[in-house]
Each structure stands twice: as C-alpha cells, then as structure tokens.
C-alpha cells in the first residue's frame, strides 16, 4: 500500500500537463488577439475608442495564461520535484501557490473592472461591480497576509 501511495504523487502530472497545455493555448490565443487588435488599430488609424478596450482585454488573456502557468509550475514543484526558477516563482508550500494565484486573480478582476469602467453603460451596476471587486480583492489580500502557512 505504501508503494502505491508513493507512486500516486505522479497523478498530479495530469493537472500539471493539462494546465500547461491550457496555458500554451491561452498564450497563443493572446497572440492571435494581439494581431487582430493591431490590425484594428491600423485600419481605424487609431480613432476607434474600442481599440483601447481591446488592448485591456489582451492583458486579461495573458494574465489568465500566466495564472495557468504558475499553477502548473507550482503543482510540479510541490508534488514532483524542485526546478530551477526565478526566486519570485519558487513555491515552497500550498500557501505560496494560493497567494501567487490570488495575486493574479486580483489583477484579472482589476482588468475586467477597467473594461467595465471604460464602457460605462450602467453607473450603478459599475459601482456595485467595483464594490464586489474591492471586497473580493480585500478578502484575497487578507487571506495572503493572515492565512499562515500550510
């Protein structure tokens, strides 16, 4: 039974490979969207205000791709073995991984809120959306600060 449990750590490779494939797909999708946005800016001579919103959306795509990559790398480091990474990406425990992912989630929410703000169709809805983003962000920041180590 012990050998089976020791080998079961390799099941995490399913999550690692799947997240890595999703990350690559998201980065490629971001690259395709980048080309489309640049073409839109060129054809409108930079006069289309929606181009700015499209540029903000690009950040969102790349942030999600980055979150998937951080998750894949973090799970590999936690369950399989340490790999050579920049210091900021080294994940020593599950709390480190959750904090790094929380940071990216806050950035994604901020980018999505900025898209809402630029479009500004429903002021009250935008206010409530901003409050919701602030509450979730504050909760994630408090979690990372007070969450302790796993």
Image (cartoon, grey):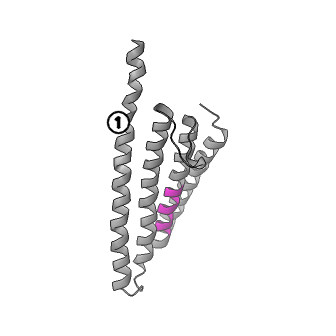
Question: Residue 91 placed where, x, y %?
Answer: 56, 40
Question: Residue 64 placed where, x, y %?
Answer: 43, 54
Question: Residue 95 placed where, x, y %?
Answer: 57, 37
Picture residue at 48% right of the left edge, 47% below the top? 70
Which residue position holds label 1?
A: 14
Residue farthest along the right direction in this orientation:
146
- Crowding near the residue tagged with mark 1, few <14, some 14–19, many ≥20 C-alpha atoms within 10 Å: few
Residue farthest along the top direction in this orientation:
1
Quadrant containing the N terminus in the rendered view: top left
Would you say residue 63 is visible in this rendering?
yes
Residues rendered magenta in the picture: 107-117
Is residue 62 magenta-colored?
no
Image quadrant where residue 33 sits:
bottom left
Picture residue at 54% right of the left edge, 53% below the top? 106
Depth check, front residue: 149 or 139: 149
Picture residue at 45% right of the left edge, 75% below the top? 52
How would you classify the magenta stretch by its main secondary structure?
helix
Q: Secondary structure at mark 1?
A: helix
């Amino acid at each position: 039974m012990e050998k089976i449990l020791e080998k079961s750590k390799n099941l995490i490779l399913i999550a690692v490979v799947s997240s890595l494939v999703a990350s690559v797909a998201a980065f490629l999708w971001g690259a395709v969207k980048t080309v489309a946005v640049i073409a839109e800016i060129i054809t409108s001579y930079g006069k289309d205000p929606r181009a700015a919103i499209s540029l903000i959306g690009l950040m969102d795509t790349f942030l999600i791709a980055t979150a998937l990559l951080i998750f894949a790398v973090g799970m590999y480091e936690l369950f399989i073995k340490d790999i050579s990474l920049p210091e900021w990406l080294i994940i020593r425990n599950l709390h480190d991984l959750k904090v790094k992912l929380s940071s990216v989630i806050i950035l994604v929410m901020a980018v999505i809120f900025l898209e809402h703000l630029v479009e500004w169709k429903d002021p009250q809805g935008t206010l409530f959306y901003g409050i919701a983003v602030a509450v979730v962000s504050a909760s994630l920041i408090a979690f990372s600060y007070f969450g302790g180590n796993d």
